[in-house]
């Protein structure tokens, strides 16, 4: 038996790998079938934005004006591209079906990218084989797919489903292809602005910052302006989404609205009113104006602080990159007067990458559980219990409170961890007169960002 065991090991390893690949494929198929069913079936209210997307495209095709090009819009003009593509590529198929199938394809490509590129950002280069990448990425990807299932239809039936993949791939390639990362993040930002904040940490940890991060981003923006001008002959509505956001009220689901909503509920008052102009529910009075002022001032200040911390953490490029990225994305949720359920999707990309890279497991594993819990609570609120929530039903108010506390904990815990990282770097610099390397060059990757250098546990 002792002689047979070494010969059996490769076969056992291949069997385990096949089982893992099959499990990943089954989870992917089940989760996406479930999400499509939610978008088309009894919880189709969660996909109501898709009807609006289709209507916008129909208005443009019928000559009533293209959103973002000829008419002021709440989204950046790049959001028009996937909306039109879903309408044109369907060949008569219902818009919701085409959109859901497109998102399924995008998520499949994202999974393949994580399997192929997962080891790159950890300083190990490309995996020697697809099997190596699968071993590293399979369980993190299963976590991500579970997150999507918990979040529900908004994980598929919103534009935010298209900005998660650019963030994931940009983080994976930032070490060796910062130009690609910069373009991906800016492309995502022209669909939904959230990916733009990740440019700050990428800028901080890249050696040739202006040439490899700033110039590609500016070049992409210039290309967008040129295309818009060629198509419409004007760029007057190009930044209209910024004004549209500034004119919004305090959305009832937002973290900032929590004390206002609870005060209305305790007083037996209506907690929200429907803003038909922008198709959302907002709250008012009881400190709503003060909450919006806190958000208008606090959000940019918080982002500035996190960008500074990202810069100070640049000597530990990988940990600084993922912590600052998670902090900035969480800040966009917590300090925002808008609090749409799909925003929760922004918290998953960095966690996925951190799990693939096997960084600081004592922090990122609990963070993965917290983010998944936020997804579950968000899915319970919308669309499952949204009417009951707007009616101030106490159990749904408790879920709402817990979810907003969870979002806040994500931000607070990430900022604390980032500050601790900066303090640890400062302590190391005081102990060592020739300071640590500050670049993110590939030739130093093995010394800087290998999985065993800063992880609390050995790599699997």
Image: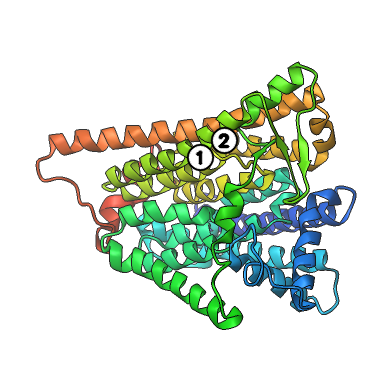
Q: Residue at x 47, y 56 (%)?
A: 196
Residue contact at pointers 1 and 2, CB within 8 angstroms: yes
Element carrying mark 2: helix
Question: Which residue sits at x=61%, y=53%?
Answer: 244
Please state which of residues 93 and 334 is positioned toward the viewer in this rendering: 334
Q: How far across and how far down the image is residue 264, in percent?
A: 73, 22
Identify the coloring: rainbow
- Element at badge 1? helix
Q: In the rendering, at what x and y percent does residue 36 appear?
A: 80, 57
Question: Can residue 102 be spotted in the picture?
Answer: yes
Q: Position of residue 190 (x, y in %)?
A: 54, 64
Q: Nearer the viewer, residue 396 or 123?
A: 396
Report whether 439 appears left or right of 201. left
Judge from the rendering whether residue 386 lies leftward or rightward of residue 420; answer left or right: right
Tell me: 260 left or right of 177.
Answer: right
Residue named by callout 1: 296
On residue 374, the disc is none
In the picture, the disc for residue 292 is 2
Q: Residue at x 64, y 36 (%)?
A: 254
Residue 138 visible: no
Which is nearer the eye, 220 or 414?
220
**Above or below, comparing residue 258 to residue 435 in the picture:** above
Q: Residues within 10 Å of mark 2 (few under 14, many from 20)?
A: many
Residue 53 x %, y %: 75, 63
């Amino acid at each position: 038996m002792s002689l047979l065991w070494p010969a059996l090991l490769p076969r056992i390893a291949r069997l385990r790998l096949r089982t893992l690949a099959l499990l990943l494929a089954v989870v992917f198929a089940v989760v996406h079938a479930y999400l499509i069913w939610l978008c088309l079936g009894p919880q189709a209210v969660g996909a109501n934005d898709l009807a609006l997307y289709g209507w916008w495209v129909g208005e443009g095709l019928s000559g009533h004006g293209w959103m973002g090009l000829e008419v002021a819009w709440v989204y950046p003009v790049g959001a028009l591209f996937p909306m039109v593509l879903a309408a044109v590529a369907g060949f008569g198929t219902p818009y919701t079906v085409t959109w859901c199938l497109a998102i399924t394809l995008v998520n499949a490509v994202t999974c393949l990218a994580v399997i192929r590129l997962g080891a790159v950002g950890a300083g190990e280069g490309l995996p020697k084989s697809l099997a190596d990448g699968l071993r590293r990425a399979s369980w993190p990807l299963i976590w991500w797919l579970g997150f999507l299932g918990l979040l529900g239809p908004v994980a598929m039936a919103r534009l935010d489903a298209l900005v998660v993949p650019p963030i994931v791939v940009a983080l994976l390639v930032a070490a060796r292809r910062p130009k690609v990362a910069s373009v991906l993040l800016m492309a995502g930002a022209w669909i939904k602005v959230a990916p733009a904040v990740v440019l700050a940490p990428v800028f901080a940890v890249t050696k040739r910052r202006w040439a490899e991060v700033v110039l590609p981003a500016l070049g992409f923006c210039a290309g967008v302006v040129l295309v818009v001008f060629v198509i419409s002959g004007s760029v007057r509505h190009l930044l209209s989404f910024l004004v549209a956001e500034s004119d919004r009220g305090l959305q009832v689901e937002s973290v900032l609205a929590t004390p206002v909503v609870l005060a209305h509920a305790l007083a037996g008052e209506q907690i929200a009113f429907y803003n038909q102009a922008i198709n959302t529910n907002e709250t008012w009075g009881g400190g709503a104006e003060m909450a919006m002022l806190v958000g208008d001032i606090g959000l940019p200040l918080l982002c500035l602080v996190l960008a500074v911390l990202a810069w100070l953490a640049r000597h530990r490029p990988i940990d600084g990159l993922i912590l600052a990225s998670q902090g900035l994305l969480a800040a966009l949720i917590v300090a925002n007067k808008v609090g749409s359920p799909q925003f929760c999707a922004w918290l998953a990309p960095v966690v996925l990458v951190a799990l693939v890279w096997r960084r600081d497991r004592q922090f990122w594993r609990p963070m993965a559980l917290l983010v998944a819990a936020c997804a579950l609570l968000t899915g319970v609120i919308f669309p499952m219990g949204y009417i009951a929530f707007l009616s101030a039903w106490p159990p749904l108010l408790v879920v709402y409170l817990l979810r907003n506390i969870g979002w806040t904990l994500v931000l607070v815990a990430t900022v604390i961890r980032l500050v601790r990282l900066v303090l640890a770097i400062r302590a190391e610099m005081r102990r060592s007169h020739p300071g640590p390397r500050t670049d993110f060059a590939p030739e130093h990757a093995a010394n800087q960002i290998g999985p065993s250098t800063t992880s609390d546990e050995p790599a699997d």
